[in-house]
Structure formats: structure tokens, C-alpha cells
């Protein structure tokens, strides 16, 4: 497992990435609220707000006592729920490292819309690919996959600092770091028969990110930059 910790891509437009910070805060708040049992049994809450493809397509129904915003809305609400602390932590680290630069390149409002569209697209691809699934899909991974796709289009020559296997420090070009991560998602999507991870949601997010980035990036933000160790106004 490779975990990113920091990148050297500078921020040029957004001094403080408030939208990215807010998305992280919402995810953390929801996790704490759910697993502190503030809203009842965590598994029941997750079933109500997670995406269940069979329910979305009318092939199954939730028990009447489960609170839910409605099947269609779970395409969105599922993005803010996580199955465990490791799931949450991994997603938030990726969002922290890559999200601020993508927000900088798109503007705060554009980045928020981009993030949500990537997440919904990811959830929808997963649901279409497994329409009879009754296990809830939860997590920000699909949206963050879109963010990673945007990052590799916009900052492939930046340097990523991270850890391999949690202990071995590395630094590598983003093209290699994120590119390897994308290949890992593809490999698992086609080979993992256990269905414990929504790999196809990750693929959906990546595809959405690749398609949507040209529509959302600022016109004066260059493709495939910046050069390694190039510094901007806010480093």
C-alpha cells in the first residue's frame, strides 16, 4: 500500500482551500456521529444512507423502520458515510493531499460541483454494474478518484512524498505515483471477485474526473504542469 503525505504543487489562486477542508470536516463529523450511535445503530444508519443498487432500481425494499432520504438521494449521501476508521482515514489523507490543488485549479464553487458529480457518477456506475447488490456502497472513494484523475492531468510533474507499506518513505513524480494507483484500481476491478471494495465505483470516479476536468479547470491553468519544485505564491 502506498500512502501520499504531501505534494509540492503550488497554490496560485486559492490561499486556503475552504471547500476541501469543509468536505473533510463533513466526512469526519458524519463518521463520529454515526459510530457514536447518536442516530441509532450504525449499521442501520449506513443501510439507510448508503447506496444499495437493488433498492435504487426497485429490486428490493428497505425495512419500513430504516430512515432514508430516498434511493435516488443515496447516490449523494453515500459519499459522506464510511464503514470504519481505516476507510475514513485513507480517504481523507488522499483528499487532503490532492484536493487543495484541484480546488485551486477549478475555483472553490467549481471544485465542489466537480467533486459531487464525480462521486455520483462513481456510485451510478457501480450500481449499473451490480444492480442486484444489497450491500450498501459507502465512502468518498469515488469522488476522490475523480480528484486524483484531475490531479494527474493538471500536475503530473509535481512530486509526491509518501510511504510504502506505512513505513518506507518515498518521493516520486505524480504521474508515476497516481498513475500506479489508477492501474491498481483497474487491476482490482477486473480481478477481485470478493466484492468487498467498490472498485468499479473508483473506476467510475476516475472516468468522470478525466471527462469533467476540461470543463471545470480555469482557462489559464496549464495542462500537465507544474515542473518539479516550482513554487507559487503560497508554496
Image (cartoon, helix red, strand yellow):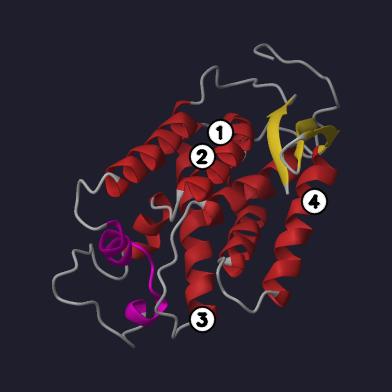
Query: Range of the magenta residues?
Result: 42-56
Q: Which mark is first along the chain, 3 or 4?
A: 3
Which residue corresponds to the image point at 59% horizontal and 29% vertical from the top-left? Answer: 104
Kindly identify which numbered label has been placed on residue 179: 4
Q: What is the chief secondary structure element of the magenta stretch?
A: helix
Kindly identify which numbered label has been placed on residue 56: none
Locate residue 140, reporting x and y percent: 49, 51
The reply to whether the magenta stretch includes residue 50 is: yes
Locate residue 164, reporting x and y percent: 78, 41
Q: Which mark is first along the chain, 4 or 1?
A: 1
Per the model, the C-alpha gap separating discs 2 and 1 is 5 Å
Left-right relation of 218 to 32: right
- Residue at image mark 1: 103
- Residue at image mark 3: 130
Label 4, residues with CA under 10 Å away: few <14, some 14-19, many ≥20 = some
Per the model, the C-alpha gap separating discs 3 and 2 is 29 Å
Label 3, residues with CA under 10 Å away: few <14, some 14-19, many ≥20 = some
- Residue at image mark 2: 111
Per the model, the C-alpha gap separating discs 1 and 4 is 20 Å
Q: Secondary structure at mark 3?
A: loop
Q: Secondary structure at mark 1?
A: helix
Q: Is residue 51 visible?
A: yes
Q: Nearer the viewer, mark 3 or mark 2?
A: 3
Amino acid at each position: 500500500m502506498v500512502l501520499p503525505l504531501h505534494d509540492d504543487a503550488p497554490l496560485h489562486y486559492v490561499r486556503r482551500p475552504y471547500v476541501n477542508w469543509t468536505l473533510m470536516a463533513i466526512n469526519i463529523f458524519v463518521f463520529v456521529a454515526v459510530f457514536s450511535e447518536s442516530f441509532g445503530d450504525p449499521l442501520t444508519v449506513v443501510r439507510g444512507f448508503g447506496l444499495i443498487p437493488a433498492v435504487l432500481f426497485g429490486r428490493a425494499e428497505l425495512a419500513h423502520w430504516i430512515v432514508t432520504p430516498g434511493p435516488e438521494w443515496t447516490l449523494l449521501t453515500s459519499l459522506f458515510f464510511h464503514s470504519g476508521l481505516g476507510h475514513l482515514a485513507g480517504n481523507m489523507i488522499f483528499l487532503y493531499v490532492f484536493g487543495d490543488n484541484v480546488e485551486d485549479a477549478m475555483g472553490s464553487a467549481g471544485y465542489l460541483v466537480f467533486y459531487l458529480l464525480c462521486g455520483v457518477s462513481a456510485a451510478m456506475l457501480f450500481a449499473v454494474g451490480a444492480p442486484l447488490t444489497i450491500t450498501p456502497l459507502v465512502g468518498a472513494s469515488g469522488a476522490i478518484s475523480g480528484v486524483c484523475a484531475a490531479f494527474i492531468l493538471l500536475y503530473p510533474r509535481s512530486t509526491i512524498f509518501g510511504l510504502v507499506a506505512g513505513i518506507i518513505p518515498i518521493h516520486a513524480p505524480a504521474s508515476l505515483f497516481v498513475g500506479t494507483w489508477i492501474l491498481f484500481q483497474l487491476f482490482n476491478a477486473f480481478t477481485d471477485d470478493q466484492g468487498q471494495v467498490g472498485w468499479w465505483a473508483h473506476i467510475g470516479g476516475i472516468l468522470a474526473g478525466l471527462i469533467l476536468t476540461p470543463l471545470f479547470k480555469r482557462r489559464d491553468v496549464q495542462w500537465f504542469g507544474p515542473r518539479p519544485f516550482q513554487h507559487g505564491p503560497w508554496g
